[in-house]
Image (spheres, helix red, strand yellow):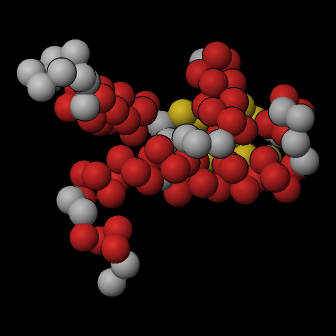
Amino acid sequence: MTKVNLFEKDLQETAAIFKALSHPARLAILKYLAETKVCISGDISDELPLSRTTVHQHLKELKKLKLIQGDIQGVKTNYCLNADTIGKLKESLNGFLSEIDCCTNSKC
């Protein structure tokens, strides 16, 4: 058992999301997909200053947490934001941030 497992499941999940979002390339991918408002067929690496291999690794991490979806069609993959997971992410982060908001904490 790792020490991470000693913490509540919701904290583990929030930490995993923060870890995935801690890299600017992943944030750029999410932002790009949000701005396009459609699924992207083709090479997202054309939009980022990174190699295809590096972008692929970042996409893999985002897919693992279900922040994005990817459907393979022939030799291309269509990437989209996963609206359900993004919605849950917003709720989770808002809840977490409200718990640690020192302005609403009576001990401030």
Q: Above or below — where is 92 with respect to 75?
A: above
Depicted 72 relative to depicted 28: above or below: below
Q: Residue at x 73, y 56 (%)?
A: 57
Q: Position of residue 70 (x, y in %)?
A: 62, 47
Is residue 38 in sight in this rendering? no
Q: Quadrant of the N terminus?
A: bottom left
How far from the left and from the top, in percent, is residue 49? 89, 35
> In the image shown, does 74 or 55 lie closer to the viewer?
55
Report the side of 24 relative to 88 (left or right): right
Can you give x and y, in whole percent of width and height, for residue 4 in the image?
Answer: 35, 68
Residue closest to the eye, 4 or 105: 105
Q: Residue furthest bottom?
A: 1
The answer to whether residue 50 of the structure is visible from this angle is yes
Residue pictured at 65% horizontal, 42% vertical? 23
Is 37 in front, or is 93? 93
**Residue at x 63% of width, y 33% of height:** 27
**Residue drawn at the location 47% of the way across and 44% of the way down:** 18
The number of discs equals 0
In the image, residue 93 sits, relative to residue 7, either above or below, namely: above
